[in-house]
Amino acid sequence: MPFVELDTSLPAGRVPAGLEKRLCAATAAILSKPEDRVNVTVRSGLAMVVNGSAEPGAQLLVSSIGVVGTAEENRGHSARFFEFLTKELDLAEDRIMIRFFPLERWQIGKKGTVMTFL
């Protein structure tokens, strides 16, 4: 059950329409998870500094169970997310940062319990 949060300083008008759905589909493909398990949030127009600069930029947070826990996994994920984000947001790679957080089943609540018991 991946959670993806995209924060960007780009104004809403510069964020492509439907980006959240395309990011959902891309995340499912990149992490090999079913699309109906992916959760995406896109926040635009934020005051941000990326790599010491207030020029337009973005930060992506990717949290998931079992697929973002090693450097080897995340190197491949990073390359694919960067390819997607640079194309969709028209930003250079040095204006984007990605953070990966592995989750455990007990850290995700759903249907009045946690994933451990579902």
Image (cartoon, rainbow, N blue to C red):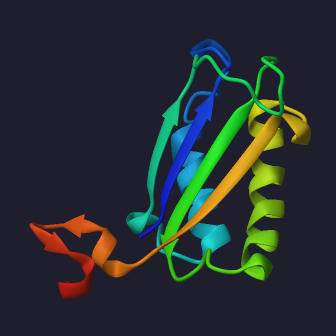
Q: On screen, 82 above or below 43?
A: below
In the rendered view of the protein, which quadrant contains the C terminus? bottom left
**Residue drawn at point x = 70 percent, y = 34 percent:** 58
Q: Residue 49, how many percent across, how many down? A: 73, 24
In the rendered view of the protein, which quadrant contains the N terminus? bottom left
**Residue drawn at point x = 39 percent, y = 65 percent:** 36
Front-lying residue, 16 or 91:
91
Q: Residue 72, how many percent across, how many down? A: 79, 81
Residue reaching furthest to the bottom:
117
Tell me: 89 left or right of 101.
right
Q: Residue 85, how many percent across, how many down? A: 75, 44
Front-lying residue, 107 or 27:
107
Residue reaching furthest to the left:
112
Q: On screen, 82 above or below 14?
A: below
Question: Quadrant of residue 106 in the image?
Answer: bottom left
Front-lying residue, 12 or 45:
45
Q: On screen, 31 above or below 59?
A: below
